[in-house]
Image: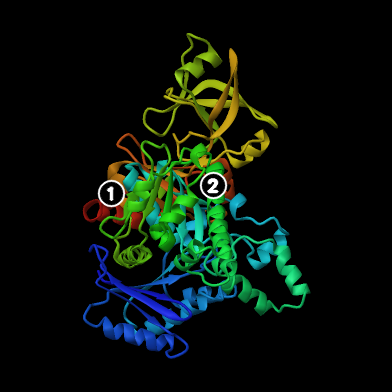
Amino acid sequence: MNVLIINCGSSSVKYEIIDPAAPRALLEGTIERIGAELSHAGAIARVLDEAKAFPIDAVGHRVVHGGDRFRDAVLIDDEVIAAIEDWSPIAPLHNPANLSGIRATREALPGVPQVAVFDTAFHHTLPRRSHTYAIDQVLAGKHHLRRFGFHGTSHAYVAELAAQALKRPLSELRLVSLHLGNGASACAIEFGHSTETSMGMTPLEGLVMGTRSGDLDAGIVIALLRQGLTLDEVDRMLNRDSGLKGLSGVSNDLREIEARAADGDEHARLAIAVFAHRVRKYIGAYAAAMGGLDGVILTGGIGENAVAMRQRICQRLEFLGLSIDEDRNADASVSDDNPVADISRGNTRVRTLVVRTNEERMIALQAARIVGGLTEPARPRPIPIAVSARHIHLDKATFAALFGENAEPTRHKDLSQPGQFSCVEKVNLIGPRGRIDNVRLLGPLRSKNQVEVSRTDEFKLGVDAPVRDSGQTRDSAPITLEGPKGTVSLREGLICAKRHIHMTPDDAKRFGVENGDEVEVAITGGLRDLIFADVLIRVSPAYALEMHIDTDEANAAELDQGIGGDLVYTGINTATAELRSRNSTCGSFRRG
């Protein structure tokens, strides 16, 4: 399948033709001076004239802002165009240009399916504590004032390559991804999901960028307006005349700034220092937010090419277990054939990786997935749903401490998953602010302790439990367990279980999914129809087909006994699965 990728900016159109099964683009180029000499329609006509030697099966458009409406790539129709237009006031430099490209391409290629891929989609997993601004929430809701995040396509792409290089599943890693270029953003990717990101409601917040200020006291804007600057003047200052350009006074090009700094220019030296400091600060903050760190990714024009800046950013992070090798850093070079270079020192626990991003290929993968999905056969349904109340799993030592040295779990009744059962034994959960008594133990005993509660339980206990897949208890929340024979204080083990579906391999084949995929499940027929997103697929011959949600989620849907769910489509992991497959044969991991 040949996918034409269109990235329309206000003054340029970048384009590529990509066959997702091929290692390199078939065609690529840029048309500049849009508006001054050429319209977007004229630019698209040039693109299609150059591309006429290739059959076009689909078109993938980069769209910067999808707000909270679009959680994934989507086939473009009139309704989608109207929704993108609705978000244009929040992204006035980007969405109108994206729409111009969409309209021109739809007119020129009326019979070709077209797909919008959103910069914001990867960040739809941001928890409320991350995306909520501390302002009046009525006003925030009315005007969509929240963090959305950007560069999501790049962060998703490089995270998957990093996981391959580290030879570990992405679902087990805590990564800080740094997309550093004229636009720059940081992203905390916790077990495969974006849980923090530096850009906010617009791409202006966060790191120092080429011409954008990044983080700024909002009082500065108020002060400038009170001193007589117009809204347009403040907008131009923050978006076009700040960042590296504003600090250095001359340029937004780091190469030119570094050359001036070497000649003694103090403004250029300050620009370099502020840029590196801001990035380093975010690495530390995100490591703390995730409760640990396995790797740091440097990508984008600066991340991939600026040797000295990489060195500055990674200084003084040894306390996190991160240290880079100067020679590896100096020699690191990434390409489509060798997309990853490890610049870490020796056996440093936290690996530092330079990764070549390729947003266009990720757009092509997602467009191919959406268009291919138009002809997918109907999937079997519905999926049985089970509601999991709070419960605990214990290891042998903890069970003995709570119930006695010679005690054994007593079977109460069998559960739906083969070999699992509820026990007669119960324990009390004691948190900093409250307690929950008589929480049932599930058997058999496991190799490590795990306590699963709902968000409502969290507040009652006074704890902040992360949303995790079962078994991922490292650096989770602490909790005290009280049994009839003793008390045990766990340093970790308390989680809110990620909603998931158990499947056999045959079930997975029939539904067209794989272990580790994430899907959306529609709940219909009850009092409150809704769609659960980010539902993890877990595949094992030992499982029985069943979706597990907690009591809060069941209450939100007002589920009746016996209602099932329909799997409506797979999420971004389907595209990254294709990426994994392609890179297993066409790409390689190379140490710097």
Residue type at mark 1: give it: Arg
Residue 413 seen: yes
Query: Quick check: 475 above or below 8?
Result: above
- Asked whether, in this view, residue 542 is left or right of residue 532, the answer is left
| Residue position for label 1 | 590
Q: Secondary structure at mark 2?
A: helix
Residue type at mark 2: give it: Tyr
Q: CA distance from mark 1 to mark 2?
A: 26 Å
Relative image position of residue 469 (x, y in whole percent): 45, 40
Give the residue furthest to the front. 263
Relative image position of residue 46 (x, y in whole percent): 33, 86
| Residue position for label 2 | 286
Relative image position of residue 252 (x, y in whole percent): 51, 70
Task: Tell me the mark number nearer the camera, choosing from 1 and 2.
Answer: 1
- Asked whether, in this view, residue 322 is left or right of residue 229, the answer is left
Query: Quick check: 479 above or below 315?
Result: above
